[in-house]
Structures are given as structure tokens and as C-alpha cells.
Amino acid sequence: MSVVVQVPGGQRRGPRLPKFTLAVPSWAWYLLFFVLPLAIIVVYSFGYKPGATTASSIGLDRLSLDNYRTAVGDKVFASTFGATLRIATVGTLLCLAIGFPVAYWLATRVGARWRPLMLSLLIVPFWTSYLLRTFGWRLVLAGRGFPSQIAQNIGLLDHPFSILDTRAAVQLGVVYNYLPLMIFPLFVALDRLDPALREASKDLGAGRLRTFLQVTVPLAAPGVVAGLLLVFIPLCGEYVTPQILGGAKGFMAGSLVASQFLEAQNWALGSAMAMVLIGMILATIGVAALAALGLRAIVRTAWRVDVGDTGGPP
Amino acid sequence: MADEDLRILVSRAAIDRRGFLGVAGVGLAGLALAACGGGEGGGGGRTQVTAPTVAKAPTDLHGTLHIYTWADYQNPANVKNFQKANNNIGVKIDIYDSNEAAIAKLEAAGANAGYDIVVPTGVFIPQMVTKGLLTQLDRSKLPNFANLDPTYLNQPWDPGNKYSVVKDWGSTGYVYDSSIYKGTPTDWAGFFEAAKAKGVSGKVTVLDAPGDVTGLAFWREGIDWNTTNPADFAKAEQILKTELVPHIKAFESFAVDGLLNGEFALSQMWNGDARQVLLEDPERFKWVLGAPKTELWVDNWTILKNAKNPDAAYAFINNILDPKVSAAEVDYHGYNTAVKGSEQYLPANLKSKELIFFSADQVKNFVPGSIANQDLVTKTFNAIKAAASR
């Protein structure tokens, strides 16, 4: 015998859709614009560049690992990836160093009235193509540009500065272009933090620095991780900003992949290089995550508060 | 000041006919179009010739002609006159910045992508034919084909010109700032020599085009530019790494502004761009044509296989092969159109003519490229770029 429990207001009208229905659009999107293209690249990476006498751009009738051998064995690829990794790591850390105070200030110091304005000021630059904005930096950094001339006129410099077409220009350009991607997740994480938690920490006798390090930062950690990934991953594949601002110094791993498609017409090798690049980025993130977890374990041990026997049952 | 800055921004972005900047083509195409729109009447040192009106009875052409070509590579006045003479037919021009990218797009779009005319560089024509992108030309619809100088016809990439008609051709050399470098170089060896000089080193640019950079070593050393021997490439890499890389500032396909504003002191350039520099300041800047060997590139009119408006395409190409129309083209982009009899219509005061019309002795040393060594060229080029970035 079964007991029927009447739930008040639980009556449904119309047919009941399966639970995953609402997720269908996002899964379709994900499948169509991420999984499928990636799968194509994976397949292409095992193909070969057909001779000039064939009509297609890629040969797939004979699959092999040759492209991977070429990509991994290429010294230029390895050294370029090293240089790219350095620019991406420094760029990501700079974004964090600049972005965290900004996000913290936005979330805790700016009044509710001004916050929407401040946030929209961060978004406004996205209304202009980043290509235009990056070209704009060329004017700012050029030896004949206005900052250089002003600096000379007021006697700060005795010669035009030469930042353009250097590593420093690349670094500056990538930090400029990716900074908002760091600030937004940090802001969201910090904004969600209940001020009461900081007050409680204060009430329990923690100083400002300790509150920041032991309450605010750990609670904002998901935002930090999201920001780091959002900046680091695209930065590793970036090649347009460096090329515009870095001149000969702006050669990145992404440029190598692009050159296989746009110069060598070797889609197979380009795909394999892209896969190796993805693998190397994932490996880097994995190593960084392990290091972070280790660091956290150490910090937790060091900061453990000994509450003695009082808390435990007798 | 503001104006000057704007000009720098725009022409950097607009690149040039072979604008190989290689970055996102779409964004640049937009900029290039904006540049064209804003640049009317202000075309640097261009002498403004009034383009000839086409004396022709109204035809039955209609619809829109779609042209897919390089940035700033077409005299707008000629286009306008063509439209006027043909029932005000629409002409829409889209821009690409590399042959490879254009071919990839055409192929992906199923042979026409909505375009009628495309302007590929000669060496890319065989693969376009193989891929079935091009239509075999009906010469009876191109009576002005007879105006072309036979020297530039019947090239290895299209024997008998079955698929292509010469649009214009040019070569590669370099421009140096004589206020910085006092030598008098005459060939590629002189380029390497100048690059080392004090004041020049660190302000050198080479084209952002793989074949032209490996060519620097091959042309100087007398090695076949179209070699497929890996040993030759190893040698070229060695030469470029030791003698050039330490002095390079940028890989730059449009060095005009950089030279004029003093950022660069020595730049490898295509002749049409080099001419723009010399028109601005012929005292300060000197042009040297590459020697003992240098490049011959030829850009070509082709009609796509599935063109929607082939009649308009034929009419447009035929019109541009008219000596008078052709002269207006030369005056606009500064490249030799290979149309016989066009020289007489050029303005008498056309400056730096020697950068458009080369002597037979010079042309003898021009080598057409090939894409058979694409992979080796790209590999070497990337190695050079990686070395230069360190």
C-alpha cells in the first residue's frame, strides 16, 4: 500500500520537460564551438600537407605522428615556448598585482552609488577593437610620440625614449589588454565577501594585515584562480599584441602556429603545434596548481591555531 | 600633431598592396577601408592625374561586381569611371592581406565566397587552379590583352595565361637614410654591410615575408632562390643569424612611416613602397635595387569559377588594360602594369620613375619565386624570427 503525500501547490500544468532541457543551449554551444573545432584540429594534426597537385588543403588518408615528432623535435618551438611562457607568467603576475588592489578597492571602498560607474569604465574600452587600442599604444610609446616629447620638454629625458619594439613594450601591451579579465573575477569574489567576516576577524583580535591574509585572501581564492587562468591561458596563445608592439622582439609560440597556416600552408603541422602548445599550457597549469596546493598546506600548518584540549570532549 | 598622429596610425594599419602584417585581416581590412576613405586627395606624394573617362556605349552590365584584392591597390577614380560607363554598376572591393589567407577563405566558401575577381600573386595560381577556384579565361572578352608586354606573359605559374592576366609586377630592394649611413651600397652585400654600421644597427627592418627574408641570403650568395636543398637553407639561416639578426629592429612590410619618422634607418622594401619614401624626401633617402639577383613578383587578375557576374569581371579587367586607364593606375599605386603604351599618358612630372620602370639589364636579374620550398622557407624564417626576439 502506498501513501500519497499531497504537496500543497505541487500540481503541474502541461508536460514535464526533462531536467537537462535548460542546459541544452549551452551544451550545444560548447559542442559546436569548442569540442567540434578542437576535434577537427586533433584529426588534422595526424594528417599531412598534400602536394601542390591535390585539391585539398590537408591529407588525411595516411595518419601518423610525424607532425608531433617535428613539433616536439623543433628547437625553435621549444625555445619560443620558453620565451612565451616567461612573458605570460610575468604578465599574469603583473595583472594580479595591479588587478587585486583595484578589485579590492572597488568591492570594499567604493560606495554603491559609484560602483556601477567604475565598473562600466572598466568595460568601455572593450567597445573599441583591441587592434585599434594596441595600435594606439604605438603612438604613445613612439620616440616621437607625445609622452616622449612632453618628458623631453620638461627635462625628464634628454633623448626620445625607445620602448617601442622591445620586450618591455610586449609586456606592457599584454598587461594592458588582459587586465580587465583579471579584475572582473577578483571583483566578483571580493564583492561576495560579507563585511561581517572581516569585522568578526577584527573582533577576535586580528590586525588588518592578518585579516587580509587569513580571511580576505583565502575567501577570494576562487576569484584569484579564475583570474589567473583567464589571463594566463589566452596570453600563452597571444601573438597579435606582441607583434604590433614588439617588432622583432614580439615573436611568440602563437606566431609559430599561425605561420604554419598562413605562410607554410601546412595545416597538419600547425594543428600538431597547436596541440603541443595546449599540452604544454595544461602541464604548466598543472605544475603551478600542485605548487599552490603544496604552499597552501604549508601555510595552513604554520598558521594552525592551537585551541588546546578545551574544544574536545573529555 | 593630432593630424600627424592620425596619419601614422592609419597608414600603418592600411599597410599596402602586399600588406603582410599577418595579423587579423578582418580588423585591418576595416582600417584599410577607413584609410582609403579618409585619404582621398591626400595620397602622400602622389601626383593627381585625372583618370581618363571610358568612352564606351552603355553596356548591358548590371548587378554588382565583387573584387577581392590587396589594400589600397586600385585607383578609385578608375573604378568610378568604370561604373559611370556601365549603367552605374556596383563595385564592391574587399581586402585581404596574404595569398594564403585569401585562398583558405575562398576554398572554405566553396569556390567563390561571393567574389568575381581575385588578385593572387603568380606563384599561388597553380594551386588555385588545382583547387578548382579559377575560371579559364575567354580571351575574346579581353581584346585589350594584346596591350600587355609579352615579357610578363607566359610565366611558369600559368603557361599561356589561361587563367590569369598581369595586373602589375615589382621587385625588392632597400631604402637607407643617407643622413645616417654615408656609404654607397649597390647590392645585397651592401645591405648587410650597412646593417652593421654604427647608427644603423638596431634600426634595420626586413620584410615580414618569409621568401623575401631567406632571399636576402640566397640572392647575395648566388644560390637559387627556389632551392629545395636543406643544406642551402642551413647556410642561409647561418648567414642571417650572424650577420643580420643582431641588427634587426622589426619585421615590417610597410616601413614607409618608420623611415620617415626616423625609427628605421635601413629597410628592405618593395619598389612601390620605397617610392613613397623617396617622394617624401628624395635627398635623405636612397633606394638600392637588390643585386646580383632579386625578386620578381607578379600580381594577376583572375576570375573565380563560380563568379556571379563574369561579364562585369571581363569588362572591368579589359578596361584596366587600356593604356590610358593603366597610366592612372600606375600613378596611383606606383607599380608597373606591363601595359604597353601607358607610359605616354603618365604625367610629365612623375617622380622617381626609375622605381617603376626598370631597365632590361635590371629585369634580367629578377627571379620569380615558387612555393615548392614553402615549408623550408617558413622553418628558416621562424628560426630567424625566434633568434631576433631574444
Image (tube, coloured by chain):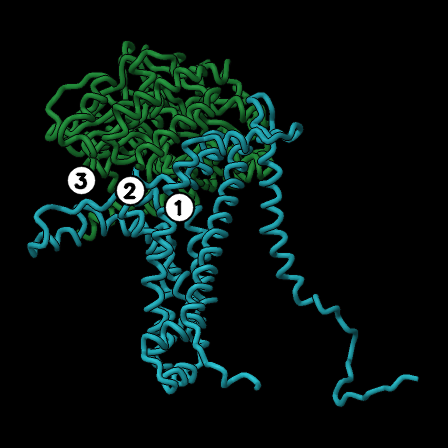
Chain colours: A cyan, B green
SS under mark 1: helix
Instruction: Report whether mark 2 lies on the same chain as mark 1.
Output: no
Q: Which residue is mark 1?
A: A85
| Residue closer to the observer: A135 or B109 | A135
What residue is rendered at 35% in x and 28% in y? Answer: B325
Q: Chain of mark 1?
A: A
Please say if A119 is above or below B206.
below
What residue is rendered at 64% in x and 30% in y? Answer: A63
SS under mark 3: loop
Instruction: Report whether mark 1 lies on the same chain as mark 3.
Output: no
Expressed as whole percent of the image width and height from the top left, the position of residue A123 reads 39, 65
Instruction: Report whether mark 3 lies on the same chain as mark 2.
Output: yes
Expressed as whole percent of the image width and height from the top left, the position of residue B378 reads 43, 28
Q: Chain of mark 3?
A: B
Dot 1 surroundings within 10 Å: few (below 14), some, or many (20 or more)? Answer: many
Q: Which residue is mark 2?
A: B11
Q: Which residue is mark 3?
A: B261
Dot 2 surroundings within 10 Å: few (below 14), some, or many (20 or more)? Answer: some
Marks 1 and 3 in Cβ contact (< 8 Å): no
Q: Amino acid at mark 2?
A: Ser
| Residue closer to the observer: B165 or B299 | B299
Distance between the Cα atoms at labels 3 and 2? 13 Å
Residue A162 visible (yes or no): yes
Q: Amino acid at mark 1?
A: Leu
Please say if B295 is above or below A230.
above
Residue B283 visible (yes or no): no
